[in-house]
Amino acid sequence: MQDVLEVTASEVSDTAPGKSPRTDTILRWLVILGVVGVLALGGLFGYSVWQEQQTEDLSTPAGRAIADFKQRVKASPNDAPLRVRMGEALASAGLYDDAVEQLRIAIKLDPKHTGAYLDLGILAMQKKETKTAEGYFNKVIELTTGSEMEDVNQRRETAFFYIGEIALDAKRYEDAAANFKAALRIRRDASDTYYLLAQAYKGMERSDAAMKQLEAALAFDPNYAEAHYLMGQIYLEEDDKINAAEHFRLAAEAAPDQDLAQEALAGLGTAEDAVANGRELLADGKPKRALEAALLARALDPKSVEAALFHGEAAEAAGEEKAAISAYKAVLEIDAENETAKAALARLQPKK
């Protein structure tokens, strides 16, 4: 895994489009029946990897890198970029106080070194000193105002992103949204920024705006589990169980080791339950509602032959022949020899 400081404070050219190094390996489940703070579920989500790292000695690559930097700094004590790199190496080894010391020295040597301020902000967030962190990030923004240099813009985007996180955690949703928008003006392919902007809009009870941002996040990262989960929650709040089930299922498939999506999906019942309910509705002469139950069953389990067959049956009863044909064809995609589906298609699509 790439070190957080290396990714955010250095020039990065190999990050895949639509994938942020801030979210590549750490899933962030921020919403549980509402907007939960960014820091509430186990600390700063971008940095939990640091908490697992121990001080490393010379037997490790990080330890050897630190030893090498110490020698180089001793030879060139007034080299600010070198001090920053050493600070990043120390931070990656969990030596936060030593890292801060090197970064502060770098700022004394070069008061305009945006990378040093950015790293200090990240370390302050790691220590949950959010006011201090926000001050450092604002300094990055101040120093980069009007600059068009790509590496500086990356730092500027990152600073806006983290200030947005801090505001989101404090439930200052409008401030959070403003900063995420500023970050997106610099980098338009950051799926995590769209996702957190959606969180801010949801906090402002602007579900439509939140959905638009989630659609953008999923356009860049179709397997973004958290975005699917939040979209599912918004649909559920609107009593759209079919779309909610679809997105909860996609979230569960994208992150099978996470419980929230699995629990949300389970709360909607099983495909078998939906089919049984649909058959009761059909027997009561309510084909439209039976069709809704069939669609829910399909959303819960797209591979269910029973759900697809009932979808065809309910669609026929509701007078939606094209939908019925599509459903029976879906059955044959799952079970190519299904006689019921074959007979239904022969009935609905007579040979000319």
Image (tube, grey):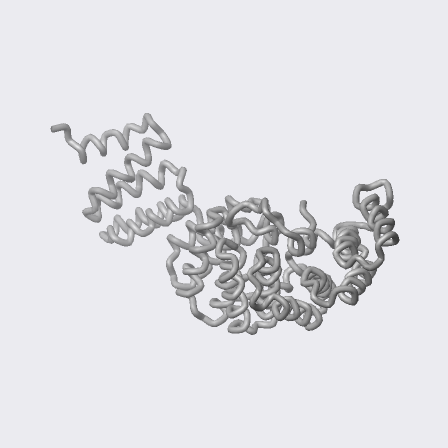
Q: Position of residue 299 (x, y in %)?
A: 39, 47
One can see residue 164 in this view? yes
Q: Please tell me which residue is depicted at 21% across the width and 48% down the height of the picture.
A: 318
Q: Position of residue 339 (x, y in %)?
A: 28, 28
Q: Quadrant of the N terminus?
A: top right
Q: Is residue 300 above or below residue 193?
A: above
Query: Disc count in the image?
Result: 0
**Left/right of residue 218 with respect to residue 8 in the rendered view:** left
Q: Please tell me which residue is depicted at 45% across the width and 71% down the height of the picture.
A: 205
**Residue 36's image quarter?**
bottom right
Q: Position of residue 146 (x, y in %)?
A: 56, 67
Q: Please tell me which residue is depicted at 46% across the width and 59% down the height of the picture.
A: 233
Give the camera-side residue of 62 and 86: 86
Q: Is residue 124 above or below residue 306?
A: below
**Residue 298's image quarter?**
top left
Q: Is residue 346 above or below residue 30?
A: above
One can see residue 125 in this view? no
